[in-house]
Structure formats: structure tokens, C-alpha cells
Image (cartoon, grey):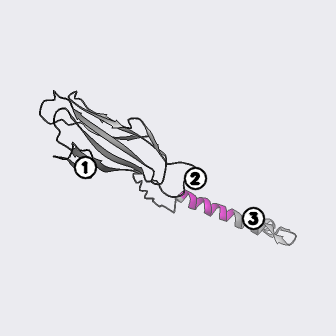
Amino acid sequence: MKRFLRWKYRSIPMGIVSAVLILCLLAGSAFAGYGFFNGSAEVTVVEPMTVVHNGIGENCYEGFSWDPETGILTLNISPSTCCDVGFYVTNNIGGDNPTGQGILTITPIVNNPYTAVTASWNPAGPVDLNPEGDSQQFDLTICADGGAPPGSYTFSIGFERS
């Protein structure tokens, strides 16, 4: 052992250097196995899509309300009339995005079990919104046919993204 520790290569004590490296490796592996550092990360993912009400048609004024917090649209219409309600959908992904990532494909949806009251979107199909504030106007047309009985009709409308 003494002979190994005194071994020199061009006046460099190789035995001592080797022994120190072995000790450092053992200590490093002990620290690596011990897990002396623990951390956590908090990530908040924000919704990149905003929907804003943007005006109503002439047959919608009486009894119309829109609550942006809950997304509930309430309106009164007479039989044989239609009501147009406008919405803007905006893609809010910001920052440097040179590769085009963050494009939202928006499809308006209507889940309506009734035949006397109909609802349709214009445009009805999917629309691609590019990042950084690209917007699309969507018009919701709700119509009550002439034979629609008085009452409340509740159905869901919305936007699906992919």
C-alpha cells in the first residue's frame, strides 16, 4: 500500500491522486443515492381561448341577458322569429411563437333536443385561430318556429377546441 501511494509519474504522486479520486467518487455516489436535494415546481396553465359577447340582433332586445361569468344566455322570442347573437373567440397565446405552435382549432357546438326551437352557428365548421390575439366572429341564430308552444327551452351551446 505504501508503495502504491508513493508511486509517481513524472513527479506527480499518482497513488495519492487516485486515492482522492476514489474517495470523491464514493462520496458523490453516496450523495446521489441519498437524494440530498428535493424541490417542487408549480405550473399554471392558462386558458388560451376567450369568448366575448359581441352584440345582438333586432329581435333580441326584450328579455335578453348574457352572464359572462356563468356563460348563461337568456332571451325571450316570439314564435316565427329569430334572434342573432354575436360572439368573438380569441386565441390569447402570446410570446415568441415562430413555429406556429398554439394554433387553436375551434368548433362551435349546439346540443339542442328540441325541434320547435333551433340554434345554429355561422360559421358552423371548425376555424383555425393563430396565436397572439387572432379572433373569429361567430353568430348564433336562435329561431322559434310558428308552432312553438310557450315555455322555457334550455339547451347547451359552446365551443370545442382541438
Which quadrant would residue 104 be assigned to in this image? top left
Please determine whether, in this image, residue 27 is positioned above or below residue 48: below
Quarter the C terminus occupies: top left
Disc 1 is placed on an element classified as loop
What is the x, y in percent for residue 144?
A: 20, 33
Label 1: how many Cα within 10 Å (few below 14, some 14–19, many 20+): few
**Residue 54 versus residue 94: which sits nearer the camera?**
54
Disc 2 is placed on an element classified as loop
What mark, if any, has residue 87 been given in the picture? none
Q: Which residues are magenta?
A: 22-33
Residue where numbered disc 2 is placed = 98
Q: Which residue is rendered at x = 48% and y = 56% of the image?
A: 94
Q: CA distance from mark 2 to mark 3?
A: 51 Å
- Residue 50 in the figure: left or right of residue 100: left
Q: Which residue is rendered at x = 13% and y = 30% of the image?
A: 149
What is the x, y in percent for residue 77?
A: 17, 39
Which quadrant would residue 147 be assigned to in this image? top left
Earlier sequence position, callout 2 versus callout 3: 3
